[in-house]
Image (spheres, grey):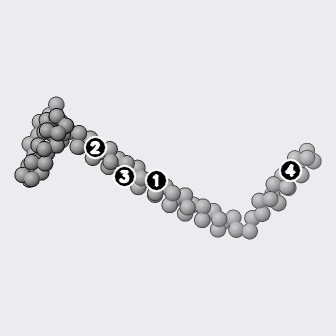
Amino acid sequence: MSRINISIPDDTLKKLDRYRYLINSTRSGLIREAIRSYFTELEGKILEERKKKAVKDIVKMRDKLGEELKGWDSTADIRKLRNEKRKG
């Protein structure tokens, strides 16, 4: 495991010590868990943004197709295909 040095404000360090004591952890353990938790939250936000973009792209595509297919009678085409199939 690698070691790093970080600087944090005194009030944050006091809070860290308070919480690590409450959960019976070390400073390093609590910081590691906080980082893991942050990354999990960040990954969720990134995934949510990707979903939003995908939905926007789908809506754009749907609108574009709607414009291109304006006036198309799908029911008539289905009937035509059925009739052709019956005629063999």
- With 25 as the anchor, is 37 left or right in this view? right
Residue at image point 81% right, 54% down: 78
- Say whether disc 2 or disc 3 marks the residue closer to the N-terminus: 2
Contact check, label 3 and label 1, Cβ < 8 Å: no
Contact check, label 2 and label 1, Cβ < 8 Å: no
Question: Percent from the top left, x then y, of residue 77?
Answer: 81, 57
- Which residue does the numbered mark 1 point to in the structure image? 51
Disc 3 crowd rating (10 Å Cα; few below 14, some 14-19, many 20+) is few
Q: Which mark is residue 82?
A: 4
Mark nearer the viewer, 1 or 4: 1
Question: Percent from the top left, x then y, of residue 53?
Answer: 46, 57
Could you tell me how far apart the alpha carbons at marks 2 and 1 are, in whole angstroms?
A: 21 Å
Task: Looking at the picture, tell me which residue is in the foreground, 47 or 13.
Answer: 13
Element at label 2:
helix
- Which residue does the numbered mark 2 point to in the structure image? 37
Amino acid type at circle 1 is Lys
Mark nearer the viewer, 4 or 3: 3
Disc 4 crowd rating (10 Å Cα; few below 14, some 14-19, many 20+) is few
Residue at image point 16% right, 31% down: 1
- Say whether disc 3 or disc 1 marks the residue closer to the N-terminus: 3
Residue at image point 9% right, 53% down: 11
Mark nearer the viewer, 2 or 1: 2
- Say whether disc 2 or disc 4 marks the residue closer to the N-terminus: 2
Q: Quadrant of residue 33?
A: top left
Q: Is residue 85 visible?
A: yes
